[in-house]
Amino acid sequence: MALGRAYSVALVGLNGYIVEVEADIGQTLPAFVILGLPDAALNEAKERIRSAAKNSGIPLSRRKITANLIPASLPKRGSGFDLAVTMAVLRAANDIKPTGRTVFIAELGLDGRLRPVRGILPAVMASVQAGYPDVVVAHANLGEASLVPGANVKGYRTLARLALDFGADPQELALDFEPEDEAGHGDSEPGAQAVPDMADVSGQGEARRALEVAAAGAHHLLLTGPPGAGKTMLAERLPGLLPDLADNEAMEVTAIHSLCGLPSSAVQLVRRPPFENPHHSATAAAIIGGGSGLPRPGAASRAHRGVLFLDEAPEYERRVLDALRQPLESGELVIHRSAGTAAYPARFQLVLAANPCPCGKASGKGLDCTCTPMMRRRYVARMSGPLLDRVDIQLQVERVSLADFGQAGAEEDTAAVARRVGDARRRQAERLRPLGMETNSQVPGRILRGALRLPAGATRILDHSLERGVLTARGYDRVLRLAWTLADLSHRDRPDTNDIGQALGLRQAASAAA
């Protein structure tokens, strides 16, 4: 008997690491030991592997089996190592030929079938990047794994069929067992979902314009107004205005969906920007990510390259809202836990919706409001100043009038607005791509005051607001970014004084109304 060897992938966040699986068969009493920091699911693989091998016609040795997963210091979690451990043990017993540099990622059923696992896409991506392009997965994961460029992926339904291809004796194998296809972890192609149309929004011309500007420059947005004014309707229509994701962006988003087990990652790349709308009772772990063991992605990461909508924003715990401040700046979430550290991309557009007060009637003259001034201040203060300073557009949404209802069907639809947004995005890309950026919201202050510096006369109103303390330095830069987006929508090469004035108004509209 020889030392068996196979390969698999361990995921830490979206980063994958090649794991070498060694197997040795000793001369002592029957036992099965797995080394290398396995979690509970991996430790349970011993019984799954024994039953799967027996029911496939290639029972494991009755002697002591030791499987070592290298590097031993890297935590291993999940059932995706089942197949790699099995192939290493079978090689150690000379039941199959050497597996070479093939990577095996699949869970085993007791009957010998290969079952799909989460995170196939980032695992195969890591395998190809590490120089291991040959990958074996469960047949149910084949479509998703094949999305990775450069990967040579094979999908199998049973362990017996896989062992046959690696030189096992066909007379011993249970080749007559052919399980039916299973729907697991997004095994079916998702159907097309209807996109909410901007034509459904009656009136709200200023809010519609703000939504268009937010989509064009990937700016964050706060909508404040009474109940029924249309804040949620507007937010739900923002993803429809955004352009399709580029190849690299779609791969990032699909990898996150794969890790979360979302069905949209089944057989095709996610091309549309995602939309996440968690309930206000969601915990910090649900929004940011976390959980026991290695951290899992939350709603902020699932909204990567899309929209994270927090309706009734003041009802969220303040620490949950403040936890978003860091990813709003960096576009990444790094979560530390005792079991390890995981990094997830989180470059999303944040949309907040809030009532003006607890009863929601403080807008306009506020004559019907039953809240005291202290209640209003406490309610609004749940959204901290540092968080709101990172929100580019802050708009007061008023109630819809009867005249607006009479103009039903006269509003522009999503397709018309999306065309203008697409044109503005292309202008931004042409200007910013040499600088390594795609949208105005990504431009740092050093470039706004350097390569993209505007004449002193154009920024005079901003300079005055900064001197009076109306704007912070961060707010100053964000108004400039808004001004560039307004210029792109108007097909101008540079913002003028009017663009800067409009941008400042979009940022201060909600605070002025309050």
Image (cartoon, grey):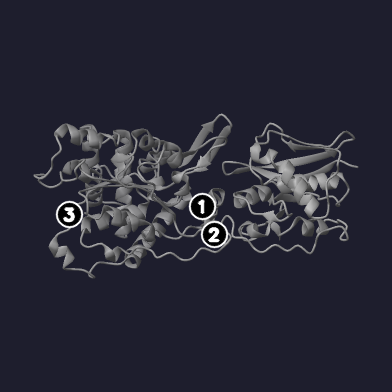
Label 1 vs label 3: CA separation? 36 Å
On the image, the x and y values in percent for residue 476 come to: 29, 39
Secondary structure under the numbered disc 1 in the rendered image: helix
* Amino acid on which the number 1 mark rests in the picture: Val
On the image, the x and y values in percent for residue 401 come to: 14, 59
Picture quadrant of residue 329: top left
Q: Nearer the viewer, residue 308 or 375?
A: 375
* Residue 81 to residue 71: above or below: below
Q: Which residue is mark 1?
A: 253
Residue at screen point 40% across, 35% down: 323
Q: Nearer the viewer, residue 17 or 6?
A: 6
Q: Nearer the viewer, mark 1 or mark 3?
A: 3
Residue 251 horizontal side relative to residue 325, left or right: right
Residue at screen point 13% across, 62% down: 402
On the image, the x and y values in percent for residue 165 come to: 81, 59
Q: Which residue is mark 2?
A: 269
Mark 2 and mark 1 residues within 8 Å of each other at the beta carbon = yes
* Amino acid on which the number 2 mark rests in the picture: Leu
Q: Which mark is residue 399?
A: 3
Secondary structure under the numbered disc 3 in the rendered image: loop
- The first of marks 1 and 3 along the sequence is 1
Residue 429 horizontal side relative to residue 468, left or right: right
